[in-house]
Image: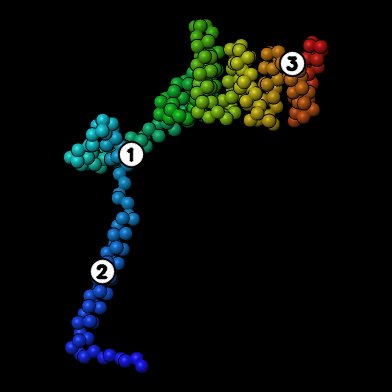
Amino acid sequence: MIKLRFCRPGEAQPLRRRVRSIVLFVVATVALGGVTLLLSGCPGEKEPELDFLRATEGVEYQGVEVPTERIAELRREVGRYRSKVEEVTEALAREASFQKLLANELMQQGMHGPALEALQRALAIQTDNPVLYYLAAVASARTARAHRIDGQRREFLELSEALYRDAIALNPRYRAALFGLAVLLSFELDRPADALEYARRTAELETKDPAVRFLLAHVLVRTGNVDEASRIYDDLARTAPATEQRQRAAANRDELRRDWQ
């Protein structure tokens, strides 16, 4: 038989107090843990500008931390100059846009020398823009025509080559720059062997433009790859979209077969 023991009123009170104390302790512990977890889950406010200034102080590269007083001073400088930095940055962006628009208008008007100068000013701001290097290369090559008298034609052509290469370095799949460099090397600088690489790369990227394939065939002929050039002309004679292109390709093919048999 199970015996039930009933506590006297005087005995039950301490037990209830102990239970209540335990419950309150558990609740407090859980609440404190939750607050701690919440706080630990909230990252501190990021200050990238301050971090940058700290990194440029130089002492951290020597394994020495930036003093607290100096950090506070840097933080004040961030607040002091932030709006000015934004203002200057926006002004430079507007200036770059103006110079690009000016260069575009000048090139459309055939003023390639002044256009090249405007592009140079734009590049001074946007130094990693491959399109600007490409446009400057085009402007430089066309400016070269006007410098036969003063003997600077070669200088402008070589500048054009360097600018094309800069554009390609920034964007290796830049088809217009690859094509332009191949044309420059083959026709203006008389270096068909150097042009062949860029003509092939252009043809690999652009398979539908007949102008690209005509250029490749031309460079192939100049480098002695007559059979490959003949095959390209033969294909163009059948597939080029324009009648004039098909006729020209057929004439080039027939001339190669006649002269190189």
Q: Say which quarter of the image contains residue 212.
A: top right
Mark 1 vs 3, N-terminal side:
1
Crowdedness of circle 3 by 10 Å Cα count: few (<14), some, many (20+)? some
Tag 3 residue: 226
In the rendered view, tell whether residue 90 sits above or below residue 144.
below
Can residue 122 be seen? no
- Mark 1 is surrounded, within 10 Å at the Cα level, by few (under 14), some (14 to 19) or many (20 or more) other residues, namely few
Q: Amino acid at mark 1?
A: Glu
Please, what is the three-letter code of the amino acid marked with disc 3? Val
Mark 2: secondary structure: helix
Give how far across and how far down residue 26 sits, in percent. 28, 70
Q: Amino acid at mark 2?
A: Ala
- Could you say where residue 98 lies in the image, as x and y percent from the top left? 43, 31
Q: Residue furthest bottom?
A: 1
Pick the residue in front: 132 or 169. Answer: 169
Q: Quickly name the residue at label 1.
A: 86
Label 2 with label 1: CB-CB less than 8 Å: no
Residue shown at the point (63%, 14%) measured from the top left: 192
Note whether 127 is above or below 41 in the view shown.
Answer: above
